[in-house]
Amino acid sequence: MELPSNIVLDSGSLNDAVILKREILYKGMNGRFVERFFLSSSKSFIFKPLTNNDQLGKEVWIHQHILPHFPEIYPKIISYKISEQPELNWMIVEDLGPLTHDFNVTSVLEVIKWVAWWHSLPIESIGPVPASGLKPQIGEIIADIVNRKEEFLLELPVLKLEREAIEHIYSLLEGSNFSHRLVVSHGDLHLGNFSMVDGQLKILDWEHTHLSSPYWDLYHLIDMSHPLFPKQVTSKLRKQFLEEYLAQLHLELDSGSFIWEYYLFSAVFSIWMISLIKKDIEAKEQRWPEEQLHRQLKETVLSLQQCLVVLSGIKS
């Protein structure tokens, strides 16, 4: 079924006159809604306006220039408009149907297979890839947590984190540089951005794709918490996921050093995330329900605790 030419109004909104029904899927950072809409009882699409003004035009660009190098593990863009006026930007994407985002070891291992695949791609074979994504680079994150060190240390009793273990992380940062190897990164590979559809993996929301450390995708996949998508990764699972990634990677590297660096990266990112989550909890206008934010905080602290055990030289 072809889309009516007037499916989207000049205002950037869906045209209810040609739509059978519509349902809201989620609210973006700028307050606009991503929706499923039906042209018939059996044919539906996803309407995705620009949900983060800083990402104007980026997702379409990624679909045109980066994803043609990939297998079909992503939903295709059917139609789009790019405008300098953020409210007039939109995409219509194929509908994969109702998706589930429950934490599942099988699906995570399937994602890891593909992460290892695109991390193995020679960057020069793809062409220009954006140099940055939505969040700060790891160097900026390190600088931020170092600047806020005393403030974070005051929170340790409430978070039930050992001061000695946290001080050890800061001491490691003084003499440790992460590998400078860059890979194509999805950029936002949390649990809500992938799902199994009819037994096949589909990965969503590629607008944050950029060049980054391989640990970036791995952290978002393994240890990144999200208020909407609960999960609990054990030390055993984390080790399994990292070993599977290395087994699938088409590159030669020191596996021991790689895994150790991942744990340090994860600890750094989790310290930074804890501060962000606490700000969200304390904010007058909360984007997420407080109960979900407290669960997200608990998950992040648990992840940090598990990484601290390894970095302290104790076998997990």
Image (tube, rainbow, N blue to C red):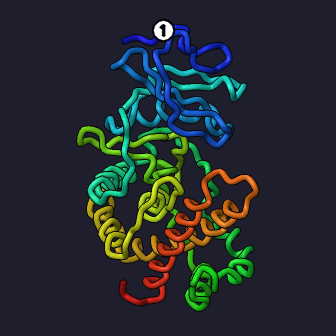
Looking at this rendering, what residue extends furthest in the left direction? 199
Total marks shown come to 1
In this image, 174 relative to 48: left or right?
right
Q: Quadrant location of residue 246?
A: bottom left
Residue drawn at point x = 43 percent, y = 20 percent: 38
Residue topped by disc 1 = 4
Q: Position of residue 128 (x, y in %)?
A: 53, 39
Residue drawn at point x = 40 percent, y = 26 percent: 94
Q: Position of residue 48 (x, y in %)?
A: 54, 30
Q: Residues within 10 Å of mark 1 (few under 14, many from 20)?
A: few
Q: Position of residue 132 (x, y in %)?
A: 60, 49
Q: Quadrant location of residue 238?
A: bottom left
Q: What amino acid does circle 1 point to?
A: Pro
In this image, 263 relative to 155: left or right?
left
Residue drawn at point x = 58 percent, y = 25 percent: 90
Point out the image quarter for the N terminus: top left
In this image, 305 relative to 133: left or right?
left
Can residue 287 be seen by looking at this rendering?
yes
Point out the image quarter for the C terminus: bottom left
Q: Is residue 153 above or below residue 222?
A: below
Residue drawn at point x = 48 percent, y = 38 percent: 127
Q: Is residue 154 above or below residue 188?
A: below
Can residue 254 be seen by looking at this rendering?
no
**Nearest the eye: 165 or 140:** 165
Q: Position of residue 278 (x, y in %)?
A: 66, 67
**Nearest the eye: 237 or 259:** 237
**Nearest the eye: 19 or 172:** 19
Helix, strand or loop under label 1: loop
